[in-house]
Image: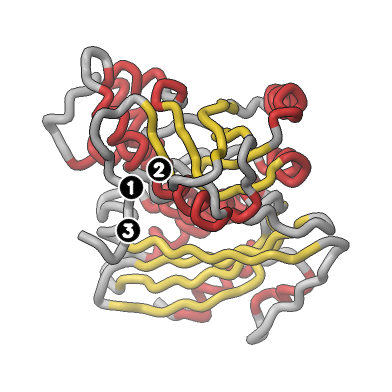
Amino acid sequence: MDEFDIIRSCFAPLARSEGAAGLLDDVAEIEIPAGRLIVTTDAIVEGVHFLSDDPIDSLAAKLVRVNASDIIAKGGRLQGALLTLVWPRARSRTDIEAFARRLGEELTIWGGHLLGGDTSATDGPLVLSLTLTGVCGERGPVRRSGARPGDDLWVTGSIGDGWLGLQASIRPDFEVSAEDRLWLVSRYREPVPPSPAFADCIARFASGSADVSDGLVADASRIASASGAGLVIEGARIPLSEAARRWLAGSSMADVGALATGGDDYQALFTASPRDRTALEASARSLGVRLTLIGTVVERGGVRLEGFDAPVATGWSHFQS
């Protein structure tokens, strides 16, 4: 396969903005609209973030969504995307074409467009990296550091489906129904962050915010640390899918701890003033976003997960076993 032919035929059609120059140049031009430009980047690596037999189009979906969740959690709207593709020589051109098609669809859904990037071949694993730019209002991004004692703690969507989906993917003996197994695996492969429009709610109401990527407890602890405060999470309030509830039936609260620390949720976790509860809930309903009040901000103490007799693990870390 020729690198420039791949760029011309698979990825140039996705680069629709004038500043991308049809991917024929070494740089892209970004027109900065009113507001603040923000940027994030995440990589997904074969054997670390996805399995070797995961469908290639699902990798494009996951790549966009794990980055989109960062932009949305900061109260921003997606803009441009830079793709780095480290492609194994053993994978076929049809795989690249399928990946490119889904990438274009996902960028359209979440509100971004391809500006450029880099491609390389390897004898090693597939590595995909996406850098996204986004636009916030004049307030700028909602940082982790804004939580204040007395604030409410909210989370979108459901927690634990990504971890359950990974278990369902790698453990034939994992005890879920065939229907739930298929659904959970799909959530691991293609997580579902909140709607891009929900970024406006975060920009308007949130005091501190992050996306849940490494686990609810781990990402809550980062908000607490950055804000110099503590967070209390009520274990019984953690929102679960119906598949997760069925898995938990008859089990202990320790299993809820696994869901709260497993990661791969890509939901928005944020704090807001109690006076905004009604407006927040109304905005979420109007957008079809599931929103749950799960705790509160206190003066100090890190993160406390109520309902557990023993400490639970904090979450995923790349550099710890």
Tell me the residue that label 3 is attached to. Answer: 317
Could you tell me which residue is drawn at 75 percent across and 42 percent down? 200
Q: What residue is drawn where x is 68% and y is 46%?
A: 207
Q: Quadrant of the C terminus?
A: bottom left
Q: Closer to the N terminus: mark 2 or mark 3?
A: 2
Q: Could you say whether the residue bearing mark 3 is in a helix, strand or loop?
A: loop
Check the image and report above or below for 120 versus 164. below
* Residue in the picture at 84% in, 58% down: 138
Rendered image: mark on residue 314: 1
Residue type at numbered disc 1:
Thr
Q: Quadrant of residue 39?
A: bottom right
What is the residue that sits farthest to the left in this orientation?
A: 173
Whether the residues at callouts 1 and 2 have beta carbons within 8 Å, the answer is yes
Amino acid residing under circle 2 = Val
Closest to the observer, 192 or 203? 203
Instruction: Tell me if 254 is positioned left or right of 138 in this view.
Output: left
C-alpha gap between disc 2 and disc 3 = 12 Å
* Residue with the most extreme front position: 299
Query: Circle 2 is placed at which residue position?
Result: 217
How crowded pointer 3 is (Cα within 10 Å; few <14, some 14-19, many 20+) is rated as few
**Left or right placement of residue 128 versus residue 285 in this view:** left
Q: Tag 3: residue type?
A: Ser
Element type where label 2 sits in the image = helix
Mark nearer the viewer, 2 or 3: 2
Specify the quadrant of the image occupied by residue 161.
Answer: top left
